[in-house]
Image (cartoon, coloured by chain):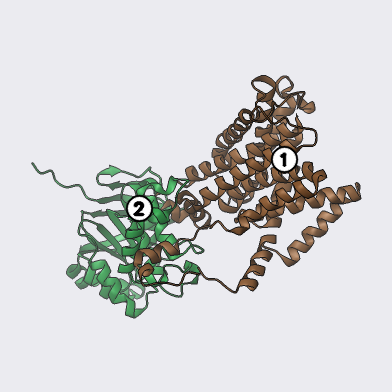
Amino acid sequence: MREAPLPALQVEGIRKQFGALHVARDVSLSLPRGARHALIGPNGAGKTTLVHLITGLLRPSAGSIRIDGRDVTSLAAEQRVTLGLARTFQISSLFPRLTVAENVGLALAARTGIDIRPWGSLRRQSAIIDEAASLLQSLTLLDLAHRPVTDLAYGRRLVEIALALALKPKILLLDEPAAGVASEDRAMLLDLLLRLPDDIAVLIIEHDMSLVFRLAQRISVLVDGAILTEGSVAEVRSDPRVRDVYLGTRAHA
Amino acid sequence: MNRQTVLSSSPQAVVARALTRHRFSWVDLLPWAVIALVYVVADTYVPLGTQVIIMIIFALSLDLAVGYGGIDTLGHAALFGAGAYGAGLVALNLSTEPITGLLAAGVAGAVVALLTGPLVLRTRGVTQVMLTLAVSTVLLEVCNAWKSVTGGADGLAGFRIAPLFGAFRFDLAGHTAYWYSAGVMAVAFLFCKVIVNSPFGLTIRGIRENPVRMQLLGVSVRLRLLMLYAMSGVLAGWAGGLTAQVTKVVGLDTLSFVLSGNALVMLILGGTGSLYGAILGATVFVVVSDRAAAINPFHWLFALGIVLILAVRYAPSGLVSLFEKGAARAFGRKSG
């Protein structure tokens, strides 16, 4: 007997306003398990706000958010994380004075629940050390493991991704993962994103269209806080309205 | 130091090395050497030494909350006073056995932390400072008004403390009190060391650095801070309990704003977030205050002021930083 699978992430009619400013107008999104969904749109369209709403850093004025069918609209951000929701930040938000290894260690400790243990040491948690090592290796961060994040000239973006992956999420929200990544590292990043486990649902916000077209199966276009259109990569690429938004003809119309 | 060998440069070893920790080193023995030296060489300073030790325990407690947890508090005396009254009340009403009283003092400190923490830890910055101040003030007023239990402005007095382990009487010269306090300080220091090295300690550092990200790693930030505050409360309670048992009086001054403020000055003078700063700061503060007051009972604060001005000018991140610089110069820069 097979039930119709519930979407991993379902956003329904989300609305958010700050006074008279509407930053999200009836936004709906549905990501089945394993989805590769891109959210694109011009600057100021409300993409990051939407990520804040989904993760729980902001409360919506109306609408609902469901993870695996469970309504999480009223849950705190940390509770949503324990249900399998992880994100990266557009402007990297890390632990600057801690080393790269400690940053990742924090995420692993949080996921495995040993972050609450006031004795012993992470050094002696061989499972965590192994996982941190392989994660850092796959992101080519191992050489930087001992450096405090604040010392890193580059690679903060990769540490962001490492933290999110360390949580073994079911749903991964990537807020401009390629911004600030050197061009020689982009191929590695894309490769990494393409190799993400199949059962993770990924929502990616990105301005690098070549990356979006390689990665995404579906694309939603957000303009002024509302979904302009949603469709397959081919549909969105050929949609004249999308081209207008990006080329700015709308402003002249 | 260890050269990297081929064996130890496996990815796992690289990661393990990159997780910093507070090692035990010869520096950890220094306070105990001083404690023993004072006992042998300067017997008359044993009571002063006891005061220093008690303030070190209190400053360690404050370092956990402020230096590691980033909790801004000007009301830490609430936890100290809870311990003092706890130990005093136990001695008066239940048992004169000192360890029992001390354990009760730790529990009292933790209970006050757990009860007031949910209120205090909701906020940050100036609001938090005001709330901690309010909590300690309210507690002080309660103890002032509730004469039947706390003795009001007269405080608690007239209790006895039985010999330690049934064998060592608390003598007039204060020798037992001195070693008793030193023992408690050893336990307190180990307690802190274990906590800051633990996964929980790393989480606390993460929360101080970036609470929002910590939340988005799935960590209940407020709950972790409450745990830390309770642990800090145990140590503050011990410090207060020791004061009660050693001086055999408990007064409202154990809850006073002055005590909270002094402890903060000690910690900042020594340096926050290293444990050693708490030890050094409390020692300098108490000894300078005492000696200056002996020389000039009217203007002794003047000496303390000069010490603070010099510290701010030459060691703005605490006296401990001077030692670190000195050690770095003496042994060359060590990495990792």
In the rendered image, is residue B90 in sight? yes
Which residue occupies 68% across, 55% down?
B268
Between disc 2 and disc 1, the foreground one is: 1
Residue B178, labelled with which disc? 1
Which residue occupies 32% across, 52% down?
A85
Q: Which of A205 and B59 is in front in this view?
A: B59
| Residue B231 percent across, percent down from the top left | 55, 41
| Residue B92 percent across, percent down from the top left | 70, 22
Instruction: Answer above or below: position of A168 versus A39.
Output: above
| Residue A47 percent across, percent down from the top left | 36, 62
Q: Which of A2 and B195 is in front in this view?
A: B195
| Residue A214 percent across, percent down from the top left | 22, 72
Total numbered labels = 2
Query: Residue B333 occupies which quadrant of the picture?
Result: bottom right
Q: Which of A171 and B255 is in front in this view?
A: B255
In the rendered image, is residue A223 in sight? no
Q: Which amino acid does label 2 sit on?
A: Ile
Query: Residue A164 occupies which quadrant of the picture?
Result: bottom left
Instruction: Answer above or below: position of B105 versus B284.
Output: above
Q: What element carries label 2?
A: helix
In the current view of this chain or complex, which residue is farthest to the left? A1
Q: How crowded is mark 2: few (under 14 residues within 10 Å), some or many (20 or more)?
A: many
Which residue was labeled with disc 2?
Answer: A54
Instruction: Answer above or below: position of A48 versus B193.
Output: below
Q: Residues within 10 Å of mark 1 (few under 14, many from 20)?
A: many
- Give the brown chain's letter: B
- Give the green chain's letter: A
Which residue occupies 75% across, 66% down?
B313
Q: What residue type is labelled 1?
A: Tyr
Q: Which chain carries label 1?
A: B
